[in-house]
Image: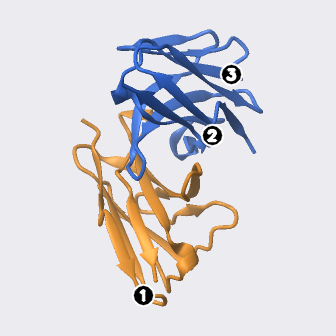
């Protein structure tokens, strides 16, 4: 089965600082997803990457997928308290219909101090 | 768009009782829904995949007689925890796939179940 390892497990940064969260897969990724979760709440979809070398940005968040499609990074520029939460990477290893089930990493808890 | 709701948001029940959790796609039709559980400070673990009009597919180690899943319509899936016990206490989250975009799961806000 596919395993995803996220690092760091937790991160505390000062408001305005940049940060990076990594996600490494034991197998080649079909699709790599980034979600954000507030404790005790559902997941908010951030981005999905599929192609090797792909990079996507939304506001101050940029996600990249390496060429080998086994590692992804999530970079936040000029962090704000609103960025605080748990960031989860999820991976699908096959395509098509109900095979879009995801395996998740354990998450990275981000705290942004004002 | 792509809003998923869950009801209830939290529930407390006595050991031995059954609890039903609903997952609804509010503004789209969901051909496939997924049920996850999450323990404190841990990741989401997929329990089962639910396809409208057919039996759910359970992940290894998940008791299908204990966690009954019904996907009766394209907008509603239910998870019933039968004869709940304290070890079933957890955070249950559903997600849904829309046929228009099969590559992205949209998640509900979750249901906190506490079994006394």
Q: Which residue is mark 2?
A: A105
Q: Which residue is mark 1?
A: B14
Question: Label 3 crowding class (10 Å Cα cut-off): few <14, some 14-19, many 20+?
Answer: many
Q: Which residue is mark 3?
A: A71
Q: How many marks?
A: 3
> Compared to B115, does B59 lie above or below?
above
Where residue B51 appears, as percent x and y from the top left, is 46, 56
Alpha carbons under labels 3 and 2: distance apart: 12 Å
Q: Nearer the viewer, residue A12 or A90?
A: A12
* Residue that sits furthest to the bottom in the current view: B16
Q: Nearer the viewer, residue B54 or B8?
A: B8
Question: What residue appears at the point 33 percent right and 67 percent down from the top-left corner?
Answer: B10
- Circle 2: element type: loop
| B4 left or right of A108 in image | left
Looking at the rendered image, the disc whose residue lies closer to the viewer, 1 or 3, is: 1
Question: Label 1 crowding class (10 Å Cα cut-off): few <14, some 14-19, many 20+?
Answer: some
Label disc, if present, on residue B103 of the rendered structure: none
Chain that is coloured blue in the picture = A
Residue B80 visible in the shown view? no
Q: Nearer the viewer, residue B70 or B61?
A: B61
Question: What residue appears at the point 66 percent right and 35 percent down from the top-left corner?
Answer: A93
Apparent colour of chain B: orange
Residue B62 visible in the shown view? yes
Q: Quadrant of residue A49?
A: top right
């Amino acid at each position: 089965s596919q395993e995803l390892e996220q690092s760091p497990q937790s991160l505390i940064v000062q408001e305005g600082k940049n940060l990076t969260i990594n996600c490494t897969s034991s197998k080649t990724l079909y699709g790599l997803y980034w979600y954000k979760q507030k404790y005790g709440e559902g997941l908010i979809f951030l981005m999905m990457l599929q192609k090797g070398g792909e990079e996507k940005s939304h506001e101050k968040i940029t996600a990249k997928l390496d060429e080998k499609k086994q590692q992804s990074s999530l970079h936040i520029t000029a962090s704000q308290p609103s960025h605080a939460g748990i960031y989860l990477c999820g991976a699908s290893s096959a395509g098509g219909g109900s095979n879009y089930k995801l395996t998740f990493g354990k998450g990275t808890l981000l705290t942004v101090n004002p | 768009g792509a809003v998923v709701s869950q009801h209830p948001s939290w529930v407390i029940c006595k050991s031995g009782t059954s609890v039903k959790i609903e997952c609804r796609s509010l503004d789209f039709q969901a051909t496939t829904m997924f049920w996850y559980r999450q323990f404190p400070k841990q990741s989401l673990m997929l329990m089962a995949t639910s396809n409208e009009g057919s039996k759910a597919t359970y992940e290894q180690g998940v008791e299908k007689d204990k966690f009954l899943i019904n996907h009766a319509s394209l907008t509603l899936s239910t998870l019933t925890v039968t004869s709940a016990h304290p070890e079933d206490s957890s955070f249950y989250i559903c997600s849904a796939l829309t046929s228009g975009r099969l590559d992205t799961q949209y998640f509900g806000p979750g249901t906190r179940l506490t079994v006394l």
